[in-house]
Amino acid sequence: MARFDIPEGWTAQAYRFALDPTPTQLRALACHAGAARFAHNHMLALVKAVMDQRAAGRSYGIGEAELTPVLGWSLPALRKAWNQRKAWCAPWWGENSKEAYNTGLDGLARGLDAWSASRRGQRAGRAVGFPRFKTSRAPRSVRFTTGVIRIEADRRHVRLPRLGAVRTHESTRKLARRIEAGSARILSAIVRQDSAGRWHCALQVIVEAKTRPAHARRSAHAVVGVDVGVKADALLVVATPDGVEVDRIGAPKSLTAAQARLRALQRRAARQHGPYDSQTGTRRQPSRRWRTTQARIGRTHAHAAAVRRDVLHKATTALAQQHQVIVVETLNAAGMRSAGGARKRGLNRALADAALAEIRRMLGYKTRWYGSHLVEADRYFPSSKTCTACGRRKPNLTLADRVFDCEHCGTRIDRDLGAAINLARLGEPSWGEQSPAGSGPVAGRGATRETEPAPAGDAAGDETSTPPHHQVDQTGTASPQGEAA
C-alpha cells in the first residue's frame, strides 16, 4: 500500500499540538519556512520569465519550435527545475530538509493549476488570480511527508525531520494510545506559526472509522435544524420540526472580551507612529511601541480564533453525536460579505465572526464519523421568511427584524428560532430526507410567487443572491425537489 492510500474502513483525521521549541529549534523552524518561501518565489520568477520570453518571441514572429522551451507547472517538473538550479541560486540549501523546498514548490504548483483551470472555466467559484510572490510577512508553514515523523515514548515530544524531538505544550497520549493499539497511523505533519508567533504541529493520520461512542446517547430529538446567527447571544439555534428549541449557543464571555480588547488595541495602534504617514503618503520606520502593540494584536487575534474554534468544535461534535438528522443552510458566506462597502462594515465583521461555512464543514465530516446524516438546504430556501404556523412568506423581512410577525395568522416568533424550525422540517421523511446528497427544497430565500429575490450583493435587505424562479404549493411552503408543486 502506498503511503497516502487510505484503506477501506479507515478515515483521515488531524491531531494538532502546540509546540514548545528550544531557541535552536525556533531558528530552524524559521529557516525552514524561509526556505519554502524562497523556493516558491524563485520558481515563480522563473515561470514568469519563461512566459514573458515566449510571448515576446511570438510577437516577433518566431516559430513555436524555436521559442524558449516550456517549463512544466506540475510539482515533479518544478522540483526537477529546482534541483538543477539550487546549487547556484541557494548554496545553503543543505541546511534545511528537502521537505521545506517541496512545500514551497507544491504551493506554487497548486496555485498555477488553480489559475489555469479557472481561466479555462473548469473551476467553480470566483476567478482565481495568478500566483503572487510571498513576502516575509506571509504565514509561515512547512509540511513534512517523508522522514521520521513520530510521537515519542514520553508523550510530550514530536519528532520531525531535521528538527529532532520538539516538546509539546500538552500531552500526546490520545494519539499515542491509538498508534500503540494499531488503530492509527501518521501520514504527514504540517508545522505552522499563528498570528501570536506560536508554532503548532498538525499530524495528519489515518484512523479506523469512528462509530458513535457507547457513552454518547442519542437525544430524543432525532431531527433538528441549525440556524447560524450573527448575534452574540445566538451563534447557533437548534430546534425540532415541532417547534421545540433544543439549544441556543451564544458567544462565550472570553470571546466577547477578546473582541473588545482587540478594538482597543487597534485604536491605540492608529494613534501611534506606524509605518505609513497618512499626511505625506510615504512609508517610514515604525516606532517600538507600535511594534509592541502589533504583537499584542496578533496574540489577541490568535486567542479569539482559538476560543471561537473551541466553541464550534464542541457544538458540532454534540450535534453529530446526539441527533440522527441535522439540517443546515447552504449559504454563500463569501458572497454575503463581498459588497455593501462601509455601510455594512459591521455586518460583514459579524458574518466573518459567525463562521458560516466552517460550521457546515465541521458537521460534514463529523456526521460521517458518528453515523449521522447531514441535510444541506438549498441556498435559496426562505427559512427566515416563512411562517412556522401557516407557511406564508414575508418577502420584505430584513436583517434588522429579529422577530417574525406573521400578518396572516398572527404568529410571533424569534427570527432565528423560526429559521431553525423550518430547516428541521426538511429532515423529516415527508420533506425529502432520503433525497440524494441531502438536498432540501429549492425555493429562493425571499422569493415569492410573483417576484424574484433581490439582486446579489444587497445584503442589507436580503440574505442571498438571485436564484431562478421557483414554484410554491397552495399553502405557501416550498415543495421538495422532485415533487410536483
Image (cartoon, helix red, strand yellow):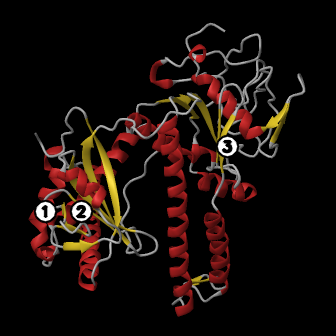
Q: Nearer the viewer, mark 1 or mark 2?
A: 1
**Answer yes or no: do the residues labelled 1 and 2 have beta carbons within 8 Å?**
no
Which residue is the site of mark 1? Answer: 148
Horizontal side, residue 87 vs residue 42: left or right: left
**Residue in the picture at 37% in, 75% down:** 136
Query: Distance between the Cα atoms at labels 3 and 2?
Result: 38 Å
Residue type for callout 1: Val
Secondary structure under tag 2 reads helix
Please state if 418 lies on the left or on the right of 238 as rendered: right
Instruction: Determine the residue positioned at 21% across, 69% down.
Output: 154
Q: Residue at x 56, y 84 (%)?
A: 293
Quarter of the rendering occupied by the N terminus: top left
Q: Is residue 17 visible?
A: yes
What residue is shown with label 2?
43
Tag 1's secondary structure?
A: loop
Query: What residue would you read off at disc 3?
Result: 457
The C terminus sits in image quarter: top right
Query: Where is residue 386 drawn, in percent x and y?
Result: 75, 27
Q: In front: 270, or 52?
A: 270
Estimate the x, y position of residue 413 in percent, counting from the top left: 81, 35
Q: Earlier in the sequence, mark 3 or mark 2?
A: 2
262 lies left or right of 17? right
Is residue 175 shown above or below 242? below
Instruction: Identify the disc placed on residue 386.
Output: none
Q: Residues within 10 Å of mark 1 (few under 14, many from 20)?
A: some
Looking at the image, is mark 1 or mark 2 earlier in the sequence? 2
> Which quarter of the figure has residue 260?
bottom right
Residue visible at 68% across and 28% down in the picture:
422
Q: Among all residues in the image, which is located at the extreme bottom?
A: 288
Residue 289 at what x, y percent from top left? 56, 91
